Amino acid sequence: MYNQKIDELIESWREDIYQTLKDWIAIDSPSSPSAGEGKPFGENVRKVLDLALSDAEKMGFSVRNIDGYAGEINLGQGEQTMGMLAHLDIVPAGDGWTHDPFGCERENGKVYGRGVQDDKGPAVAALYAMRAVKEAGIELKDGVRLILGTDEESGMRGMRYYKAHEKMPDYGFSPDADYPLINIEKGGIGILLSAVSDGESDAEIPIYELNAGIRSNVVPGTARAVVGTEKVSAEEIRSRLAVMEPEAMAYEINVTELEGNRAQIETVGVQAHASLPHLGLNAAGLLFKALKRIGAGGGIKDAVAAMADKFGTEGHGESAGIKTDDEECGPLTCNIGLLRFDGTQLRVTLDIRWPLATNEEKILGQMCMALSDTPLAVRRTGGHGVHYVPKDHKVVKGLLEVYHDVTGLPAYPIAIGGGTYSRMMPNTVAFGICFPGDVDTCHMPDEYIDWEKFILSTKIFAHAIEKLAGKP
Protein backbone atom coordinates (compact mmCIF):
# COMPACT_ATOMS: atom_id res chain seq x y z
CA MET A 1 0.00 0.00 0.00
CA TYR A 2 2.84 2.38 0.85
CA ASN A 3 6.03 3.14 -1.04
CA GLN A 4 8.60 0.55 0.12
CA LYS A 5 11.43 2.82 -0.99
CA ILE A 6 10.74 4.83 2.18
CA ASP A 7 11.60 1.90 4.45
CA GLU A 8 14.67 1.00 2.41
CA LEU A 9 16.04 4.53 2.65
CA ILE A 10 15.48 4.76 6.40
CA GLU A 11 17.18 1.41 6.93
CA SER A 12 20.18 2.62 4.93
CA TRP A 13 20.46 5.76 7.07
CA ARG A 14 20.63 4.10 10.50
CA GLU A 15 24.11 5.42 11.29
CA ASP A 16 23.34 8.85 9.82
CA ILE A 17 20.24 9.07 12.01
CA TYR A 18 22.23 8.06 15.07
CA GLN A 19 24.98 10.60 14.38
CA THR A 20 22.44 13.41 13.92
CA LEU A 21 20.74 12.43 17.17
CA LYS A 22 24.10 12.29 18.92
CA ASP A 23 25.04 15.78 17.73
CA TRP A 24 21.75 17.26 18.93
CA ILE A 25 21.83 15.45 22.29
CA ALA A 26 25.39 16.70 22.92
CA ILE A 27 24.04 20.23 23.42
CA ASP A 28 22.68 20.78 26.92
CA SER A 29 19.68 22.95 26.01
CA PRO A 30 17.20 23.65 28.80
CA SER A 31 15.34 26.91 28.33
CA SER A 32 17.18 29.68 30.18
CA PRO A 33 17.10 33.50 30.42
CA SER A 34 17.62 35.46 27.22
CA ALA A 35 21.19 35.79 26.01
CA GLY A 36 20.40 38.70 23.71
CA GLU A 37 18.76 39.28 20.36
CA GLY A 38 17.85 36.05 18.59
CA LYS A 39 18.53 34.02 21.74
CA PRO A 40 15.34 34.44 23.80
CA PHE A 41 15.88 31.18 25.68
CA GLY A 42 19.64 31.21 26.06
CA GLU A 43 22.82 30.38 24.15
CA ASN A 44 22.42 26.61 24.02
CA VAL A 45 18.81 26.57 22.84
CA ARG A 46 19.87 28.83 19.96
CA LYS A 47 22.90 26.60 19.34
CA VAL A 48 20.83 23.43 18.92
CA LEU A 49 18.26 25.28 16.81
CA ASP A 50 21.01 26.49 14.47
CA LEU A 51 22.41 22.97 14.25
CA ALA A 52 19.03 21.43 13.45
CA LEU A 53 18.31 23.95 10.70
CA SER A 54 21.81 23.52 9.27
CA ASP A 55 21.38 19.74 9.16
CA ALA A 56 18.03 20.13 7.41
CA GLU A 57 19.46 22.58 4.90
CA LYS A 58 22.22 20.10 4.02
CA MET A 59 19.45 17.58 3.23
CA GLY A 60 18.02 19.99 0.68
CA PHE A 61 15.17 21.51 2.67
CA SER A 62 14.28 25.17 2.85
CA VAL A 63 14.57 26.41 6.43
CA ARG A 64 13.67 29.51 8.43
CA ASN A 65 14.72 30.76 11.83
CA ILE A 66 11.85 32.63 13.48
CA ASP A 67 13.87 35.10 15.58
CA GLY A 68 15.28 32.27 17.71
CA TYR A 69 11.82 31.37 19.01
CA ALA A 70 11.25 28.48 16.59
CA GLY A 71 12.56 26.92 13.43
CA GLU A 72 10.85 25.85 10.22
CA ILE A 73 11.82 23.01 7.87
CA ASN A 74 9.72 22.91 4.71
CA LEU A 75 9.01 20.35 2.00
CA GLY A 76 6.86 21.12 -1.04
CA GLN A 77 3.82 23.32 -1.40
CA GLY A 78 0.09 22.90 -1.73
CA GLU A 79 -3.31 24.33 -0.92
CA GLN A 80 -2.85 23.18 2.66
CA THR A 81 0.11 22.48 4.92
CA MET A 82 0.64 19.44 7.08
CA GLY A 83 2.58 20.28 10.23
CA MET A 84 4.71 18.30 12.66
CA LEU A 85 5.45 20.00 15.99
CA ALA A 86 8.48 19.00 18.04
CA HIS A 87 10.79 20.83 20.44
CA LEU A 88 14.51 21.14 21.05
CA ASP A 89 14.54 22.41 24.65
CA ILE A 90 14.96 19.85 27.41
CA VAL A 91 14.55 19.65 31.17
CA PRO A 92 17.80 19.77 33.15
CA ALA A 93 19.63 16.45 33.32
CA GLY A 94 19.45 16.25 37.11
CA ASP A 95 21.04 13.55 39.24
CA GLY A 96 21.00 9.75 39.23
CA TRP A 97 22.37 9.02 35.75
CA THR A 98 24.50 5.94 35.06
CA HIS A 99 25.11 7.10 31.47
CA ASP A 100 26.39 10.42 30.18
CA PRO A 101 23.17 12.46 29.72
CA PHE A 102 24.74 14.19 26.70
CA GLY A 103 26.69 11.26 25.29
CA CYS A 104 23.90 9.47 23.40
CA GLU A 105 25.43 6.17 24.51
CA ARG A 106 24.26 2.89 22.93
CA GLU A 107 23.90 -0.19 25.08
CA ASN A 108 21.80 -3.37 24.73
CA GLY A 109 19.58 -1.94 22.03
CA LYS A 110 18.93 1.31 23.88
CA VAL A 111 20.18 4.84 23.30
CA TYR A 112 20.55 7.00 26.41
CA GLY A 113 20.50 10.78 26.74
CA ARG A 114 18.51 13.76 27.91
CA GLY A 115 16.04 14.47 25.13
CA VAL A 116 16.23 11.19 23.22
CA GLN A 117 12.58 10.58 24.07
CA ASP A 118 11.45 14.12 24.90
CA ASP A 119 11.77 15.57 22.32
CA LYS A 120 14.98 15.82 20.29
CA GLY A 121 14.69 12.16 19.32
CA PRO A 122 11.21 12.54 17.82
CA ALA A 123 12.35 15.73 16.06
CA VAL A 124 15.23 13.82 14.42
CA ALA A 125 12.82 11.02 13.43
CA ALA A 126 10.43 13.55 11.86
CA LEU A 127 13.30 15.20 9.94
CA TYR A 128 14.49 11.88 8.47
CA ALA A 129 10.88 10.95 7.69
CA MET A 130 10.66 14.10 5.56
CA ARG A 131 13.97 13.24 3.91
CA ALA A 132 12.71 9.74 3.09
CA VAL A 133 9.54 11.11 1.49
CA LYS A 134 11.58 13.59 -0.55
CA GLU A 135 14.20 11.10 -1.74
CA ALA A 136 11.64 8.38 -2.44
CA GLY A 137 10.00 10.75 -4.91
CA ILE A 138 6.58 10.84 -3.20
CA GLU A 139 4.36 13.38 -4.94
CA LEU A 140 2.68 15.74 -2.51
CA LYS A 141 -0.67 17.51 -2.69
CA ASP A 142 0.06 19.54 0.48
CA GLY A 143 3.18 21.18 1.81
CA VAL A 144 4.89 19.62 4.81
CA ARG A 145 6.44 21.66 7.62
CA LEU A 146 8.40 20.53 10.64
CA ILE A 147 8.24 23.22 13.33
CA LEU A 148 10.91 23.07 16.01
CA GLY A 149 9.91 24.80 19.23
CA THR A 150 12.37 26.06 21.81
CA ASP A 151 10.43 26.48 25.06
CA GLU A 152 7.95 23.62 25.38
CA GLU A 153 9.13 22.60 28.85
CA SER A 154 8.75 26.10 30.33
CA GLY A 155 5.45 27.47 29.05
CA MET A 156 5.50 27.13 25.24
CA ARG A 157 6.45 30.79 24.79
CA GLY A 158 8.36 29.96 21.62
CA MET A 159 5.31 28.47 19.93
CA ARG A 160 3.10 31.28 21.14
CA TYR A 161 5.50 33.72 19.45
CA TYR A 162 5.42 31.60 16.31
CA LYS A 163 1.59 31.59 16.27
CA ALA A 164 1.53 35.37 16.69
CA HIS A 165 3.88 35.95 13.74
CA GLU A 166 3.31 33.07 11.30
CA LYS A 167 0.43 31.18 9.74
CA MET A 168 0.05 27.82 11.43
CA PRO A 169 -0.25 24.61 9.37
CA ASP A 170 -3.75 23.35 8.66
CA TYR A 171 -3.44 19.94 10.28
CA GLY A 172 -0.87 17.49 11.53
CA PHE A 173 0.60 15.79 14.59
CA SER A 174 3.05 16.26 17.43
CA PRO A 175 5.43 13.33 18.06
CA ASP A 176 5.74 14.06 21.77
CA ALA A 177 3.46 11.59 23.51
CA ASP A 178 2.11 8.09 22.91
CA TYR A 179 0.83 5.72 20.27
CA PRO A 180 -1.64 4.73 18.96
CA LEU A 181 -2.91 8.37 18.94
CA ILE A 182 -4.19 11.01 21.36
CA ASN A 183 -7.15 12.93 19.95
CA ILE A 184 -8.49 14.44 23.17
CA GLU A 185 -6.68 16.45 25.83
CA LYS A 186 -8.93 17.44 28.69
CA GLY A 187 -9.58 21.04 29.56
CA GLY A 188 -7.75 22.45 32.56
CA ILE A 189 -8.53 25.01 35.21
CA GLY A 190 -6.48 26.25 38.14
CA ILE A 191 -8.40 27.32 41.25
CA LEU A 192 -7.09 29.06 44.37
CA LEU A 193 -9.01 28.42 47.59
CA SER A 194 -8.17 30.81 50.39
CA ALA A 195 -9.16 31.71 53.92
CA VAL A 196 -7.85 34.19 56.49
CA SER A 197 -7.32 33.18 60.11
CA ASP A 198 -9.64 34.93 62.54
CA GLY A 199 -6.80 35.06 65.06
CA GLU A 200 -8.48 32.79 67.61
CA SER A 201 -5.88 32.23 70.36
CA ASP A 202 -7.61 29.85 72.81
CA ALA A 203 -7.80 26.89 70.40
CA GLU A 204 -7.21 23.44 71.82
CA ILE A 205 -4.74 22.61 69.01
CA PRO A 206 -3.78 25.74 67.04
CA ILE A 207 -2.17 25.41 63.61
CA TYR A 208 0.88 27.58 62.99
CA GLU A 209 2.06 26.32 59.61
CA LEU A 210 0.95 24.11 56.71
CA ASN A 211 3.04 23.08 53.72
CA ALA A 212 2.62 20.59 50.87
CA GLY A 213 3.34 20.31 47.18
CA ILE A 214 6.00 21.39 44.70
CA ARG A 215 3.79 22.05 41.67
CA SER A 216 0.04 22.16 41.22
CA ASN A 217 0.16 19.39 38.58
CA VAL A 218 1.69 16.85 40.98
CA VAL A 219 -0.14 14.85 43.65
CA PRO A 220 1.85 15.69 46.82
CA GLY A 221 3.60 12.70 48.36
CA THR A 222 4.19 14.41 51.71
CA ALA A 223 2.52 17.20 53.70
CA ARG A 224 3.42 18.88 56.96
CA ALA A 225 1.67 20.81 59.74
CA VAL A 226 3.12 22.55 62.79
CA VAL A 227 0.61 22.62 65.66
CA GLY A 228 0.57 23.78 69.28
CA THR A 229 0.78 21.26 72.16
CA GLU A 230 0.19 23.47 75.22
CA LYS A 231 -3.26 21.96 75.85
CA VAL A 232 -3.03 18.63 74.00
CA SER A 233 0.21 16.66 74.12
CA ALA A 234 1.95 15.14 71.14
CA GLU A 235 1.20 11.73 72.63
CA GLU A 236 -2.52 12.50 72.77
CA ILE A 237 -2.37 13.69 69.13
CA ARG A 238 -0.82 10.34 68.19
CA SER A 239 -3.60 8.54 70.05
CA ARG A 240 -6.33 10.46 68.22
CA LEU A 241 -4.70 9.82 64.85
CA ALA A 242 -4.32 6.11 65.52
CA VAL A 243 -8.04 5.61 64.80
CA MET A 244 -8.01 7.33 61.39
CA GLU A 245 -10.08 5.38 58.89
CA PRO A 246 -7.99 3.26 56.46
CA GLU A 247 -7.24 4.58 52.97
CA ALA A 248 -7.20 2.52 49.79
CA MET A 249 -3.42 2.87 49.72
CA ALA A 250 -0.97 2.55 52.59
CA TYR A 251 0.00 5.82 54.24
CA GLU A 252 1.97 7.12 57.20
CA ILE A 253 1.20 9.82 59.75
CA ASN A 254 4.17 10.81 61.89
CA VAL A 255 4.06 13.10 64.92
CA THR A 256 7.34 14.68 66.08
CA GLU A 257 7.71 16.88 69.14
CA LEU A 258 9.33 20.27 68.56
CA GLU A 259 10.64 22.96 70.88
CA GLY A 260 8.34 25.62 72.27
CA ASN A 261 5.24 23.48 72.92
CA ARG A 262 4.84 22.56 69.29
CA ALA A 263 4.70 19.38 67.23
CA GLN A 264 5.03 18.47 63.57
CA ILE A 265 2.46 16.26 61.91
CA GLU A 266 3.69 14.73 58.66
CA THR A 267 1.49 12.72 56.32
CA VAL A 268 3.05 10.46 53.70
CA GLY A 269 0.96 9.47 50.70
CA VAL A 270 1.88 8.46 47.14
CA GLN A 271 3.08 10.99 44.55
CA ALA A 272 1.54 10.90 41.06
CA HIS A 273 0.71 13.19 38.15
CA ALA A 274 -2.33 15.40 38.74
CA SER A 275 -4.02 13.99 35.63
CA LEU A 276 -3.91 10.50 37.20
CA PRO A 277 -4.75 11.08 40.88
CA HIS A 278 -6.06 7.53 41.31
CA LEU A 279 -2.47 6.31 40.94
CA GLY A 280 -1.45 8.29 44.01
CA LEU A 281 -2.65 9.26 47.47
CA ASN A 282 -2.81 12.98 48.16
CA ALA A 283 -0.81 13.73 51.31
CA ALA A 284 -2.28 17.26 51.55
CA GLY A 285 -5.83 15.89 51.54
CA LEU A 286 -4.76 13.28 54.06
CA LEU A 287 -3.32 16.03 56.28
CA PHE A 288 -6.60 17.95 56.23
CA LYS A 289 -8.44 14.79 57.31
CA ALA A 290 -5.90 14.20 60.09
CA LEU A 291 -6.19 17.78 61.35
CA LYS A 292 -9.96 17.59 61.38
CA ARG A 293 -9.76 14.28 63.24
CA ILE A 294 -7.78 15.82 66.12
CA GLY A 295 -9.82 19.03 66.14
CA ALA A 296 -6.93 21.26 65.10
CA GLY A 297 -7.19 24.62 63.46
CA GLY A 298 -7.62 27.60 65.73
CA GLY A 299 -8.46 30.51 63.45
CA ILE A 300 -8.71 28.26 60.38
CA LYS A 301 -10.48 25.30 62.01
CA ASP A 302 -13.62 25.64 59.88
CA ALA A 303 -11.59 26.02 56.68
CA VAL A 304 -9.54 22.93 57.51
CA ALA A 305 -12.71 20.93 58.19
CA ALA A 306 -14.19 22.15 54.88
CA MET A 307 -11.10 21.01 52.98
CA ALA A 308 -11.28 17.61 54.67
CA ASP A 309 -14.97 17.21 53.91
CA LYS A 310 -15.16 18.70 50.41
CA PHE A 311 -11.87 17.40 48.97
CA GLY A 312 -9.87 15.11 51.24
CA THR A 313 -8.15 12.45 49.15
CA GLU A 314 -10.97 11.94 46.62
CA GLY A 315 -9.37 13.07 43.36
CA HIS A 316 -12.68 13.30 41.45
CA GLY A 317 -14.45 16.30 43.02
CA GLU A 318 -17.67 14.56 44.07
CA SER A 319 -17.92 16.17 47.52
CA ALA A 320 -17.08 19.55 45.97
CA GLY A 321 -20.03 19.17 43.60
CA ILE A 322 -18.02 18.94 40.36
CA LYS A 323 -17.77 15.21 39.64
CA THR A 324 -18.25 14.57 35.90
CA ASP A 325 -17.57 11.73 33.51
CA ASP A 326 -18.06 11.01 29.83
CA GLU A 327 -17.43 8.04 27.58
CA GLU A 328 -14.82 9.67 25.33
CA CYS A 329 -12.70 11.54 27.90
CA GLY A 330 -13.18 9.69 31.15
CA PRO A 331 -13.68 11.42 34.51
CA LEU A 332 -12.92 14.89 35.76
CA THR A 333 -9.89 14.93 38.05
CA CYS A 334 -9.31 17.31 40.96
CA ASN A 335 -5.95 17.57 42.70
CA ILE A 336 -4.87 19.50 45.78
CA GLY A 337 -1.49 20.46 44.35
CA LEU A 338 -0.16 23.18 46.65
CA LEU A 339 -0.92 23.92 50.31
CA ARG A 340 0.48 26.86 52.26
CA PHE A 341 -0.42 28.48 55.61
CA ASP A 342 1.84 31.03 57.29
CA GLY A 343 -0.22 31.63 60.42
CA THR A 344 -2.41 34.23 58.76
CA GLN A 345 -3.62 33.11 55.32
CA LEU A 346 -4.49 29.64 54.08
CA ARG A 347 -3.89 29.09 50.35
CA VAL A 348 -4.76 25.87 48.49
CA THR A 349 -4.18 25.47 44.75
CA LEU A 350 -6.33 22.98 42.84
CA ASP A 351 -5.48 21.45 39.47
CA ILE A 352 -8.67 20.32 37.70
CA ARG A 353 -8.79 18.44 34.37
CA TRP A 354 -12.24 18.35 32.85
CA PRO A 355 -13.90 16.29 30.07
CA LEU A 356 -16.20 17.31 27.24
CA ALA A 357 -19.30 16.85 29.41
CA THR A 358 -18.65 20.02 31.41
CA ASN A 359 -16.94 23.43 31.16
CA GLU A 360 -15.18 26.07 33.27
CA GLU A 361 -18.30 28.11 34.01
CA LYS A 362 -20.18 25.06 35.23
CA ILE A 363 -17.28 23.85 37.37
CA LEU A 364 -16.82 27.24 39.04
CA GLY A 365 -20.55 27.61 39.66
CA GLN A 366 -20.93 24.15 41.14
CA MET A 367 -17.87 24.56 43.38
CA CYS A 368 -18.97 27.97 44.64
CA MET A 369 -22.34 26.51 45.59
CA ALA A 370 -20.75 23.52 47.33
CA LEU A 371 -18.44 25.81 49.33
CA SER A 372 -20.97 28.58 50.02
CA ASP A 373 -21.36 27.57 53.67
CA THR A 374 -17.60 27.43 54.30
CA PRO A 375 -14.97 30.16 54.89
CA LEU A 376 -13.20 29.25 51.64
CA ALA A 377 -13.03 31.87 48.88
CA VAL A 378 -12.80 30.61 45.29
CA ARG A 379 -10.72 32.26 42.54
CA ARG A 380 -9.82 31.05 39.05
CA THR A 381 -6.09 31.36 38.36
CA GLY A 382 -5.94 30.17 34.75
CA GLY A 383 -7.06 27.49 32.38
CA HIS A 384 -7.65 26.22 28.88
CA GLY A 385 -10.37 24.39 26.98
CA VAL A 386 -10.53 20.82 25.75
CA HIS A 387 -8.37 20.03 22.72
CA TYR A 388 -10.51 17.69 20.62
CA VAL A 389 -10.16 16.22 17.15
CA PRO A 390 -13.14 13.93 16.36
CA LYS A 391 -12.56 10.24 15.73
CA ASP A 392 -13.86 10.53 12.17
CA HIS A 393 -11.48 13.37 11.23
CA LYS A 394 -9.14 12.59 8.33
CA VAL A 395 -6.06 13.09 10.51
CA VAL A 396 -7.24 10.63 13.15
CA LYS A 397 -8.41 8.03 10.65
CA GLY A 398 -5.33 8.38 8.45
CA LEU A 399 -2.76 8.16 11.24
CA LEU A 400 -4.47 5.21 12.89
CA GLU A 401 -4.52 3.42 9.54
CA VAL A 402 -0.79 4.04 9.09
CA TYR A 403 0.02 2.92 12.63
CA HIS A 404 -1.87 -0.34 12.18
CA ASP A 405 -0.54 -1.06 8.69
CA VAL A 406 3.11 -0.42 9.62
CA THR A 407 3.12 -2.12 13.03
CA GLY A 408 0.29 -4.66 12.85
CA LEU A 409 -0.82 -3.43 16.29
CA PRO A 410 -4.36 -2.41 17.32
CA ALA A 411 -5.09 1.23 16.50
CA TYR A 412 -7.46 3.36 18.55
CA PRO A 413 -7.70 6.97 19.76
CA ILE A 414 -7.23 7.80 23.44
CA ALA A 415 -7.91 10.76 25.71
CA ILE A 416 -5.48 12.12 28.30
CA GLY A 417 -5.57 14.61 31.13
CA GLY A 418 -2.18 16.08 30.27
CA GLY A 419 -1.33 18.61 27.58
CA THR A 420 0.90 18.34 24.51
CA TYR A 421 2.14 20.61 21.72
CA SER A 422 -0.78 19.44 19.58
CA ARG A 423 -3.13 21.94 21.21
CA MET A 424 -1.05 24.72 19.63
CA MET A 425 -2.27 23.89 16.12
CA PRO A 426 -5.73 23.17 14.65
CA ASN A 427 -6.73 19.65 13.59
CA THR A 428 -3.65 18.25 15.30
CA VAL A 429 -3.16 15.18 17.48
CA ALA A 430 -0.34 13.68 19.53
CA PHE A 431 1.18 10.68 17.74
CA GLY A 432 4.13 8.73 19.20
CA ILE A 433 6.79 8.04 20.06
CA CYS A 434 6.07 5.78 23.07
CA PHE A 435 4.40 2.49 22.18
CA PRO A 436 1.79 0.85 24.44
CA GLY A 437 3.56 -0.87 27.32
CA ASP A 438 6.79 1.13 26.94
CA VAL A 439 8.41 2.73 29.97
CA ASP A 440 8.06 6.50 29.76
CA THR A 441 11.51 7.75 30.76
CA CYS A 442 11.19 11.40 29.78
CA HIS A 443 12.39 13.76 32.55
CA MET A 444 13.92 10.77 34.36
CA PRO A 445 17.57 9.79 34.94
CA ASP A 446 18.85 7.50 32.17
CA GLU A 447 16.19 8.65 29.71
CA TYR A 448 16.37 6.25 26.78
CA ILE A 449 14.77 5.04 23.56
CA ASP A 450 14.60 1.52 22.17
CA TRP A 451 16.62 1.89 18.97
CA GLU A 452 14.58 -0.53 16.83
CA LYS A 453 11.34 1.12 17.89
CA PHE A 454 12.87 4.50 17.13
CA ILE A 455 13.68 3.42 13.57
CA LEU A 456 10.14 2.02 13.34
CA SER A 457 8.77 5.41 14.43
CA THR A 458 10.78 7.13 11.72
CA LYS A 459 9.10 4.86 9.16
CA ILE A 460 5.67 5.49 10.70
CA PHE A 461 6.16 9.26 10.46
CA ALA A 462 7.28 8.99 6.83
CA HIS A 463 4.27 6.90 5.86
CA ALA A 464 2.06 9.33 7.78
CA ILE A 465 3.34 12.16 5.59
CA GLU A 466 2.72 10.00 2.52
CA LYS A 467 -0.80 9.16 3.69
CA LEU A 468 -1.95 12.63 4.71
CA ALA A 469 -0.02 14.99 2.41
CA GLY A 470 0.75 12.75 -0.55
CA LYS A 471 -1.24 12.60 -3.74
CA PRO A 472 -3.72 9.69 -3.85
Image (cartoon, grey):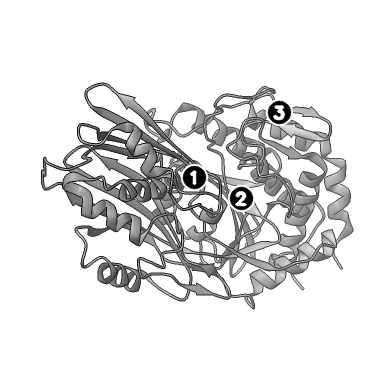
Work out whether 283 lies above or below 102. below
Residue 382: which quarter of the image? bottom left
Give percent across and percent down for residue 461: 73, 55
Mark 3 residue crowding within 10 angstroms, few (<14) / some (14–19) / many (20+): many
Q: Secondary structure at mark 2?
A: loop
Residue under the point 49% across and 45% down: 152
Relative placement, left or right, of 226 versus 272 is left
Identity of the amino acid at label 3?
A: Cys
Identity of the amino acid at label 2?
A: Asp
Q: Which residue is mark 1?
A: 152
Q: In the rendering, which numbered label is found on residue 417? A: none
Mark 2 vs 1: CB contact within 8 A? yes
Q: Earlier in the sequence, mark 2 or mark 1?
A: 1
Q: Secondary structure at mark 1?
A: helix
Mark 3 vs 2: CB contact within 8 A? no
Which image quarter holds the N terminus? Answer: bottom right
- In the rendered image, is residue 419 in sight? no
The residues tagged by marks 3 and 2 sit, at their Cα atoms, a distance apart of 19 Å
Residue 210: which quarter of the image? top left
Which image quarter holds the C terminus? Answer: bottom right
The residues tagged by marks 2 and 1 sit, at their Cα atoms, a distance apart of 10 Å
Q: Which residue is mark 2?
A: 176
Q: Which residue is mark 3?
A: 104
The residues tagged by marks 3 and 1 sit, at their Cα atoms, a distance apart of 21 Å
Give percent across and percent down for residue 72: 55, 48
Relative placement, left or right, of 141 versus 254 is right
